[in-house]
Image: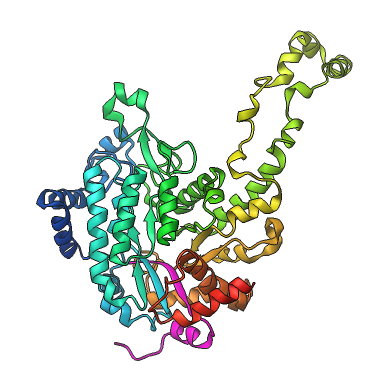
Amino acid sequence: MDTIVSKAAKIRAQLDHPLIDGDSHIVEYTPVFLDYLKEAGGPDIAARFAKTMGAGFSLSGDARKSWYAMSWEERRETRLMRSPWWALPTKNTLDRCTAMLPKLYHARMDEVGLDFAVLYPSVGLMFNHNFGDDEFRTVACHAFNEYTAAIYGPYGDRMTVAAVIPLNTPEEGIKELEHAKKLGLKVAMIPAYIRRPFPDLHKKHPELAGRVNWLDSFGMDSAHDYDPFWAKCVELGFPVASHSGSQGFDDRRSMSNYMYNHMGHFGAAGEMLAKALVMGGVTKRFPELRVACLEGGVMNGVRLYGDLFSRWEKRSLDSLQNLDPMNIDQRLARELFEKYGDKDTLAKLDQLEHTLAFGPKTIERDVRDDFAAMQITCEEDIRDLFIPHFYFGCEADDPLSAIAFDRRLHPLREQVRAIMSFDLGHWDVTDMTHATSEAYEMVEEGLISSEDFRTFAYGNSVQLYAGPNPDFFKGTIVEKQVTKELAAAKTR
């Protein structure tokens, strides 16, 4: 090991608080994982996994062959989205192996300037998005959690790996939550959405099931009642995290360009989940629920927080009176049109009343209130239903993270909760020892204060992970500091 002290380690040494990485990655050693998969589901499941790995995963449930196995003629004919390629670092062999070997990861934590890391899968990111194969999805999640609990468990003083939770139904989610709890896992990674078939279309054309579907984000208009799942998360003390992407959405499905599909896709998926949960009343019904929307940065969270205020202000039940077509003064409108209308307009005055209505004249009162599930009575209710519940993962080199801390920009002068999350192990981090220094540049460049950085790199992660489970950091090297942080937060 190089004895030179890294810049990351020097930055950590000057701080009086721990640094928690809220989202970095392991890279699974699949030959070992296959043993767990065989144990959980038998050799046939393992063979299907190996075949899928060779062909390339499809997050849409699309059964067509891999983009990389197609000719350009086939790509143009099918318009199949170009899937990710070269997603893991290779030039820095030490970092690549670090992501694969928990003992090495653990040994290098001080070098990369971190006290504790919450780790997420790489290959396993796709297991709970395997929408079309119920058996493989549930078995793969079960096996992955067995694998990480065994392989990474001995290093729990400085790291923990999130459990992969399938959620096509609340029942399968609850079953795997309980399994993860028994294994000692502490974070529930759920998909941001489930792709579901249109029943009328797929009865006639079952071959379209993987290609034409709607997105179920669990909080609104869902195919199931997911409240039992949220209740189980709260009961078992699981913070919930979503590390889903939206590549393959209509605006992110280029058949030729991976980067076109990649830009903004994590943020869009996280925004969809957060919006569904808050507007569907989930955070109202489960005030202890904590949800992380990872890798997309804080921009979508900032916009969503502001949008909730502006939309409610203009389209609450009271404000809708400004838009009710029945309020139009037809007599005054006719007088104004007769006085100021041109020749062509005056020739069609018989259509004035219909045109002014611009849509249905009446809407039943029970479907007018788009915010009914939130039960808002004042602006502070919106704040309380959003701010303490959602945490947005921001990578080290994202300068827009600073916007989360500028209270002047946000309703009620709140800070939207951003968490430092480095994405170590993936292609956008070419040197693990650089991430901490990149994140700290926001302080050095005057974009945020030292106190803001403390909140970003430590305080918000404590609230996210230990808020639902005060014992989350028990037995870790940061246990004492976290205990003090939680006590201070209660006082505040």
Numbered label tally: 0
**Residue 413 appears in the figure:** yes
456 vs 474, nearest the viewer: 474
- Left or right, 259 with respect to 73, comes to right
What's the coloring here? rainbow
Q: Residue at x 60, y 61 (%)?
A: 416
User: Is residue 19 found inside the magenta-colored segment of the image?
Assistant: yes
Q: Horizontal placement of 84 versus 114: left or right? A: left
Query: At which x and y percent is residue 212?
Result: 36, 32
**Quarter the C terminus occupies:** bottom right
| Above or below, 379 relative to 222 | below
Residue located 38% across and 57% down the image: 189
Q: Where in the figure is residue 404, as x and y percent of width and height? A: 60, 63
Q: Residue 308: horizontal and vertical position, in percent? A: 63, 47
The quadrant in which the N terminus is found is bottom left
Q: Nearer the viewer, residue 271 or 282?
A: 282
Q: Is residue 61 magenta?
A: no
Q: Residue placed at 49% from the left, 46% from the top?
A: 272
Left or right of 250 on screen, residue 281: right
> Percent x, y for residue 146?
23, 62
> Who's the residue at 66% across and 45% down the image?
376
Q: Is residue 86 visible?
A: no
**Which range of residues does the magenta coloring cover?**
1-25
Q: Quadrant of residue 93?
A: bottom left
Specify the farthest residue to the front. 235
Question: Along the horizontal axis of the image, is 385 left or right of 193?
Answer: right
State whether residue 155 is above or below residue 319. below
User: In the depicted view, which residue is nearer to us: 122 or 366?
Assistant: 366
